[in-house]
Image (spheres, rainbow, N blue to C red):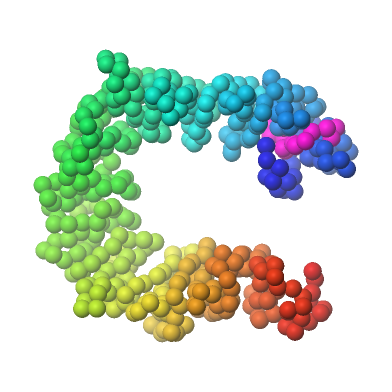
């Protein structure tokens, strides 16, 4: 349990329990905690050092360094207050507990999901638990959050996370006790030892197949029985949008996650992943884009291409002064001419791109795509984007903000981009739309504790101070 987190919960959360009664964490004058009803009447005495809100009819409490769960009558449940620590795990309605240096899991009724005798547990979509970790006798097992065993402990010493109902990892060979690669099928409950020559690397399963690398030169796939089921490839890219880019006999193509060839290996070069249903590839020393049916949808006419991102892609050429870039959309329309050393963009929430930041040297200026007019010149040394489509800009190591329409809301007078983002979030919460100099200074007070009424008194009238 953590007091910092607890205080945040107390201000925001309460839980309705049986009979319609609501119990809310409550402290007394001595700093002890208990629970009160909505009228402030103490229902569970304030005798605990820490408490957390009720979840599924129980609450975690700590008293004299002993932790556990109580019900809504204040009675300990499960094994009682015997643990050295207890923490709720996300949305899984289980608690991680510590007991005499070991860890385990209990549910909201105090029943063991995983006995508290593990050296460590790793929590994700499933629970990996183990003993003697980082030693030659390490063992791991996997359960789900209901306590169902998915892989018995002892088969693997180390493993990737469970993927596609298969576990890939290393464990002790039954034949010679050497460390070898293994598969474990959690549905069939079957363990398979894999060939393990030096330099081989197995990867997690996806759609029934796992990638294998041999000495960083040969790549192929195996099935759930550990059998090779694909040709050898010189290169296999990252699985993206259900597809792999591959190279075979020096030429590039695309296969899907079921290992079916979607684009034949016939191209001289290609991007390393599929992006937004398109693949940038090269033919006759020119780059263009093909779709997943192999149709050339954007002509092979560029010296440089990049994968699509948020509906747009960089294209470019090699000039005497270096690489120059432009920007195209999915239809291949050139929205930004190829003449810039760099382009930064972030579409508004509708997906429409209304402007970009372009640089011909080291400074970025704003280009309006509708009018093709430039603004904010000579420009900024750095541009970032926040979640609302605003541009966080930097000049002379000071930061400000330009909105999606190109209006300078916050001048570049703020010490950090984080502070600007905080100021914009505060303005949004407060409904501020007029960023006058006075509003700017008021927002700055929250971000710079050194600023006070004395230094700002000439800018903010007395009747505007509320703190």
The residue nearer to you, when weighing 56 against 238, is 238
Q: Position of residue 39 (x, y in %)?
A: 87, 42
**Residue 163 image point, x, y percent:** 38, 34
Number of labels in the image equals 0
Q: Which residue occupies 67% across, 28% down?
A: 84
In the picture, residue 281 is in which quadrant? bottom left
- Would you say 296 lies left or right of 379 here? left
Q: Residue at x 14, y 55 (%)?
A: 267
**Can residue 44 be seen from the camera position used here?**
yes
The quadrant of the rendering that contains the N terminus is: top right
Quarter where residue 429 is shown: bottom right
Which residue is more in the foreground, 178 or 292? 178
Q: Residue 396 placed where, x, y %?
A: 50, 78
- Report the residue that reaches farthest toward the front: 135
The residue at 52%/62% (across/down) is: 387
Residue 69 seen in this snapshot: no
Q: Tell me if residue 267 is in the magenta stretch.
A: no
In the displayed structure, 412 sits above or below 303; it is: below
Q: Residue furthest top?
A: 175
In the displayed structure image, the side of residue 382 where residue 201 appears, left or right: left
- Tell me if 413 is positioned left or right of 279 in this view: right
In magenta stretch: residue 50: yes
Q: Quadrant of residue 431?
A: bottom right
The boundaries of the magenta stretch are 45-59
**Which quadrant, please, contains the C terminus?**
bottom right
Image spot of residue 220 (x, y percent): 20, 37
The structure residue drawn at horizontal position 31% and vertical position 45%, both measured from the top left corner, is: 239
């Amino acid at each position: 349990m953590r007091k910092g987190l607890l205080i945040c919960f107390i201000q925001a959360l309460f839980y309705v329990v049986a009979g319609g009664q609501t119990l809310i964490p409550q402290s007394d004058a001595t700093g002890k905690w208990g629970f009160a009803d909505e009228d402030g009447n103490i229902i569970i005495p304030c005798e605990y050092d820490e408490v957390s809100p009720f979840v599924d009819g129980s609450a975690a409490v700590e008293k004299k360094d002993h932790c556990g769960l109580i019900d809504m009558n204040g009675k300990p449940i499960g094994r009682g207050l015997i643990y050295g620590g207890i923490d709720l795990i996300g949305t899984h309605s289980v608690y991680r507990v510590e007991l005499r240096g070991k860890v385990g899991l209990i549910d909201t009724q105090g029943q063991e999901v995983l006995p508290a005798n593990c050296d460590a547990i790793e929590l994700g979509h499933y629970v990996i638990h183990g003993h003697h970790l980082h030693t030659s006798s390490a063992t791991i097992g996997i359960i789900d959050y209901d306590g169902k065993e998915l892989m018995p402990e002892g088969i693997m010493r180390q493993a990737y996370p469970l993927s596609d109902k298969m576990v890939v990892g290393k464990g002790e060979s039954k034949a010679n006790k050497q460390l070898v690669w293994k598969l474990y099928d959690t549905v069939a409950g079957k363990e398979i030892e894999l060939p393990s020559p030096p330099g081989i690397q197995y990867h997690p399963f996806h759609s029934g197949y796992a990638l294998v690398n041999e000495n960083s030169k040969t790549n192929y796939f195996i099935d759930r029985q550990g059998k090779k089921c694909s040709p050898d490839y010189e290169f296999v890219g990252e699985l993206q949008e259900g597809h792999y880019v591959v190279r075979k006999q020096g030429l590039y193509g695309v296969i899907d996650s079921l290992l079916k060839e979607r684009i034949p290996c016939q191209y001289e070069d290609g991007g390393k992943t599929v992006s937004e249903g398109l693949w940038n590839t090269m033919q006759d020393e020119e780059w263009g884009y093909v779709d997943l049916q192999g149709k050339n949808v954007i002509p092979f006419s560029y010296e440089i291409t990049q994968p699509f991102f948020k509906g747009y892609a960089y294209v470019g050429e090699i000039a005497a002064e270096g690489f120059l870039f432009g920007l195209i959309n999915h239809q291949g329309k050139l929205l930004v001419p190829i003449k810039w050393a760099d382009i930064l963009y972030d579409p508004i929430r509708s997906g429409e791109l209304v402007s970009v930041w372009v640089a011909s040297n080291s400074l970025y200026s704003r280009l309006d795509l509708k009018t093709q007019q430039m603004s904010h010149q000579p420009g900024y040394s750095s541009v970032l984007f926040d979640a609302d489509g605003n541009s966080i800009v930097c000049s002379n190591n000071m930061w400000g903000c330009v909105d999606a329409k190109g209006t300078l809301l916050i001048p570049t007078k703020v010490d950090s981009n984080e502070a600007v983002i905080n100021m914009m979030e505060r303005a949004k919460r407060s409904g501020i739309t007029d960023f006058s100099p006075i509003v700017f200074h008021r927002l700055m007070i929250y971000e710079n504790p050194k600023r006070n009424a004395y230094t700002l008194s000439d800018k903010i009238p007395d009747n505007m101070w509320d703190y």
